[in-house]
Image (spheres, rainbow, N blue to C red):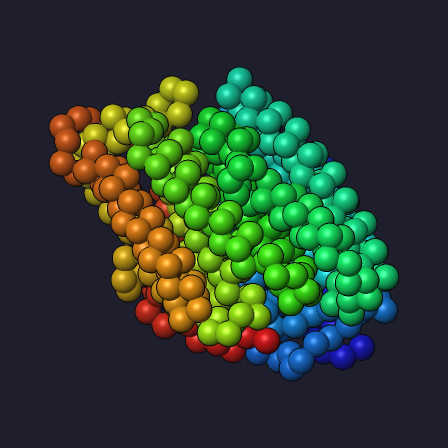
Amino acid sequence: MEPVLALFSVVLALPVISALLIPLLEKKPKIARTICIAILAVNIILLMALLTRIKGNYSLFEGAIVVDKFSILFAVLITLSTLIATYGASPTLDTWHGGAAFYSLALLALTGVYAASMSGNILTLLSAWILSSIASYTVVALAKDPLSVEGAAKYAVMGSASSTLLFLGVTLFFAITSGVIINGKLVLSIEQVILATMVSLLASIGFKMGVFPFQGWLPDTYGGSHPSLIALVSGVAKCLAIVTLLKFSSLLSSACQYWLPLIALLSILTMFYGNLGALVQESAQRLLAYSSIAHAGYLLVGFAALSPLKGMMRDWALAGLAIHFAAYSIGKAGAFLALTVIHGEGGVKLEDLKGLGKADPWLAGSFTVLLLSLMGMPPLIGFWGKLFLFASVVFATPWLTLIALLNTAISVAYYVRIIKAMYFEKGVAEVKVRGGSARRAVIVAAILSLVLGLGPIQLLTYMSLP
């Protein structure tokens, strides 16, 4: 077997085997945690080795799996954010006695994303979607408090609707390509069928991504469930949606004239809904939940640039999607973990953050860096993601770039509310004594947001572009 294929086999096998064995360590959560973190760290090293060695595409299992640099890049990024989330979740998991289950589900969800990003046919993609989705639903319910259970129930119900629409879209996709190969050729050119396929797939992926008007579950799930669990799920769900939409975008965008107006409309509505909704929140956690919706809108700007319209910058769009996902997944993992260190009943309110700058300067400073990155402040990684995304459409549809910049300005207002509460409002924020690993994870996420923005992420993305 070629070294590249051998490496890839190990990357897939390690999390799967570990996920199946970790539940046996239910009474030894510390060992389960150590194994999970070690597997994630090893996988990052192996994936980086793959990224430097791979040239072109590698096919496995008669085309069921197709490995290329860009899919490996997303695998690296989601593994990194999963590592941050799993490391920081430890203090709360010890309280629930659900550590082994969490680590097993985290690895299963990650494996699903791996398979989806490297899927070569529809069957592999569907299997990966189902595996990652079910693991994510279960993770949200692990806390067992009323709000987490409610959030998990809404997530599962809406997720089931999303999966049903995905099956419908895939069925129509099979009809227009007459095969299960994702990058197959168009054999049926009936415009109505192509449009129906596009709408079904966008609705399905829109549910998972939190795109308006399919975002109904997200504010309650992300805004009410325990934040240490959402730190993991937010990155996994977004990555699964991005890589799935990327699989279908090349064919659909070139086959239908409605791609650009439909994607642009969804992007604008999603950005405004998420940002305006975040402005009126008094709960810091719900504020972050609504901002997750807004970030889905920013990502759709990049998908709009995949249209074959003259002036669209496809490479910039792909780079923006990867970099912005890195900023989002690391930023959200760190931000939600920061909330777990703060005492608060029924979620952390903005008033619970008052005085955090004095109570814990390192936590507050790291939280601020993450918020600035999500805001798009240079030279942090979030700035580069938005720069590439917005610039990718500026020559073909400058009005979309202008609207995206306007929404970024709106987002500054609510991110500043959190920073203001921590540093400029009187109060005494209470910090959990057992929040050590969560606190360290937030600091690491902040450092990564700065260091990656200074050059590494741009270089890594440039190396990975198809």
x and y, in percent, of residue 387 in the image:
36, 64
x and y, in percent, of residue 299 in the image:
48, 55
Q: Residue drawn 76% across and 79% down?
A: 2
Q: Nearer the viewer, residue 412 or 342?
A: 412
The quadrant of the picture occupied by the N terminus is bottom right
Q: Nearer the viewer, residue 228 or 299?
A: 299
Q: Residue drawn 61% across and 61% down?
A: 257
x and y, in percent, of residue 410 in the image:
29, 45
Viewed as shown, does residue 146 lie left or right of 438?
A: right
Viewed as shown, does residue 101 lie left or right of 453?
A: right
Q: Residue furthest top?
A: 146
Viewed as shown, does residue 80 lie left or right of 57?
A: left
x and y, in percent, of residue 70 in the image:
59, 69
Q: Is residue 105 above or below residue 1?
A: above
Total labels drawn: 0
Name the quadrant containing residue 450.
Answer: bottom left
Viewed as shown, does residue 266 lie left or right of 331?
A: right
Q: Nearer the viewer, residue 2 or 287?
A: 287
The answer to whether residue 381 is seen in the rendering is no
Q: Residue drawn 76% across and 53% down?
A: 193
The answer to whether residue 420 is seen in the rendering is yes
Q: Nearer the viewer, residue 371 or 208?
A: 208
The quadrant of the picture occupied by the C terminus is bottom right
Q: Residue drawn 47% across and 31% down?
A: 219
